[in-house]
Image (spheres, rainbow, N blue to C red):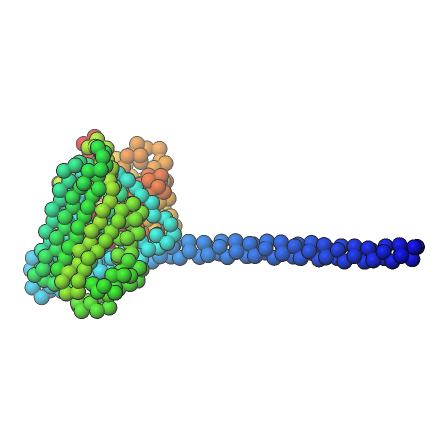
Amino acid sequence: MANIFVAIQTSLSAAHRVVLFMLLFVVVLSCVGIILLLKTNADLEKKAKKAKEENEAKADQILRISHDVRGALNVIMGYSSMLEDQEDLSPETREDMGKIYDSSRYLENLINDMTDVSKIEQGKVELNLQTVNGIEFLGSIAKFYAKEAKRKGINLEYSFDLTAGEYVVLDEVKSRRIYSNLLSNAIKYSQAGTCIKWTVKDEPLASDKVTMVSVIEDQGCGMSQEFMEKMFEPFTQEMNYQGNGPTGTGLGLAIVKSLVELMGGTISAESQLGVGTKFTIAMERNLGKAAEVTEEVGEAPVNVEGLMGKKVLLCEDRPLNMQIMTMMLERCGMEVTTATNGRQGVDKFKASPEGCFAAVIMDSRMPVMDGLQATKEIRKLKRSDAKTVPIVAVTGGIYDGLDHESSKAGVTEQLIKPVSQDQLSAVLSRLVCKKQDK
């Protein structure tokens, strides 16, 4: 019996040892697994952080490139516009100036597309809703593209039927981008002698809400059914287009679709090769009231006479841009004081008599001190005009109206390069004359 007991005890001890060994093996394996999992998570977090930093660096680089390219465009388009205004130009020279203008506009659209795509990828696109006069808003876009179409011998017909409500709530910048992209495409892919039709109607949903249905129809080259299946994908283009000149990056429709969906709308298309294309956009809009309009969107009368003899401080580091902006300001009848960086701009403002400058034009990117910091420094000065003088930031980046940082710094309004004579005159007329009327 004793021998049997010892054998059983020995057998149990061996079994225990096996169990303990297996448990120990499982614990060690689990620890190794946990360590590997933690390391993997750490590596993933490190890669994610690196990817985020790389994306942010890429986005910043794109904005820097955008600023530099737009600065060059500002010079090209500015000089072209001034030369084209000369009455003694020969028909051949005037035609050549038109070609320079068209090429500059094309390059500007490329930069717009690349910057927009970068912002969409970064998730930095947010809605900035405001109440506008619907007819005036749409009309300002239509009038601009009617002129563009006329330059190519195309007729743009437009009709806006907003019977449910005169004022609507929308993101002005993004809505303008949607319509502009589609109208620009319609003009680009149409031939002289054809017609483009743009209609907008509102359909009541409730007492304070409508569905705005916009239809843009052209008689252009049309699209194949194969291409239409992927037309909203980035960098996608119809390869059988036989028109002359560049056809773009293939980003326009992708941007349109992203912005339409951001606003909760839908977009559809009908097209036939050699016949034309029809785009339909439907978006719900809340109705607003006249009292909610912060600023009317139309072509407000420009009071250039109100700028005559007024002094303006221009801060710009690029000599050619400074030269073209100075010429534009002098065309408004203004006396220009220049500064080559933000620090110099602040010092010249401080050294001036109080109330000397009617406005400040501030380039956003400059050495020594950038435009945003210079604006902050001016606003902090202990003199009454430092708080009230209109400061217009000129930027090469694309912003959703007056962005938070600029507004916080004290910027009154922003202009995107290239800046035209009409834009500059209109903004200064409104800001300076409005300030005088108070």
Residue 338 visible in this rendered orientation of the protein: no
Left or right of 382 in this view: 287: left
389 vs 92, nearest the viewer: 92
Question: Which quadrant is the N terminus positioned in?
Answer: bottom right
- Give the total number of marks visible in the rendering: 0
Q: Residue at x 36, y 42 (%)?
A: 405
Question: Which quadrant is the C terminus positioned in?
Answer: top left
The spot of residue 162 in percent (x, y) is: 15, 40
Residue at the limit of the structure toward the front, as seen here: 1
16 vs 130, nearest the viewer: 16
In this view, 71 is above or below 332 = below
The spot of residue 53 in percent (x, y) is: 45, 54
Quadrant for residue 372, please give it.
Answer: top left
Q: Residue at x 20, y 43 (%)?
A: 212
Residue 199 visible in this rendered orientation of the protein: yes
327 vs 293, nearest the viewer: 293
Q: Residue at x 13, y 62 (%)?
A: 275
The spot of residue 281 in percent (x, y) is: 22, 49
Q: Residue at x 32, y 33 (%)?
A: 383
The spot of residue 103 in percent (x, y) is: 20, 62
